[in-house]
Image: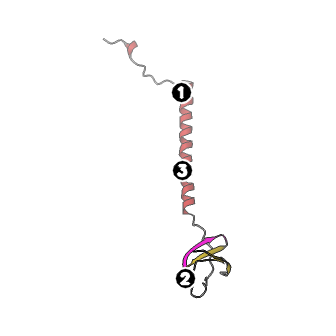
Amino acid sequence: MSDMNDAPATSKGPLPPELRFLKTLVTVLTATMILGLITIVALLVIRLNAPAPAPVLPDAITLPDGVGAEAVTMGRGWIAVVTDGNKILIYDAETGLIRQSVDLKP
């Protein structure tokens, strides 16, 4: 026959104060983590869906006669065109007029 003193206690009494505190702490930290994760995901969605600002371009850029473009690059307020005649032509981004011409040595 079994002795009742060896059986585990199954009565549902109130939790000790330390365990109640630990249970509350785990619940609060879990809720904080879930809210933080939702916030991070929302910020990523907002940032990644925002359109990138379009660069300001002139209506047209006119190259000198007999010159072809090999490469184009843009900076703040300027556009550089590398020509097939070993020159770099730097244009104003708003007006499309040449600001500077740089000769390249072959």
Query: Which quadrant holds the N terminus?
Result: top left
Magenta-drawn stretch contains 71 = yes
The disc labelled 1 sits on which kind of residue? Leu
Q: Amino acid at mark 2?
A: Gly
Residue at the (52%, 25%) spot, across then down: 15
Of 35 and 92, nearer the camera is 92
Residue at the far front in the pictured view: 106
Q: Is 5 positioned to the left or the right of 89 in the image?
A: left
Q: CA distance from mark 2 to mark 1?
A: 79 Å
Circle 2 — which element?
Answer: loop
Q: Main secondary structure of the magenta part?
A: strand
Crowding at dot 3, Cα within 10 Å, few <14 / some 14-19 / many 20+, comes out as few
Residue that carries the numbered disc 1 in the rendered image: 19
Snapshot quadrant of residue 101:
bottom right
Q: Nearer the viewer, residue 42 or 11?
A: 42
- Residue 38's disc number: 3
Write down the region rendered in magenta. 68-76
SS of the residue under disc 1: helix
Structural crowding at the residue carrying mark 1, measured as other residues with C-alpha within 10 Å and reported as few (<14), some (14–19) or many (≥20) = few
Residue 68 is labelled as 2
Q: Is residue 75 above or below residue 14?
A: below
Q: Residue farthest to the bottom?
A: 65
> Viewed as shown, does residue 96 lie left or right of 5?
right
- For badge 3, the amino acid type reads Ile
Decide if residue 70 is on the left or right side of residue 102.
left
Find numbered disc 3 in the image and state the secondary structure of the residue it sits on: helix
Answer with mark 2 or mark 3, whichever residue precedes in sequence.
Answer: 3
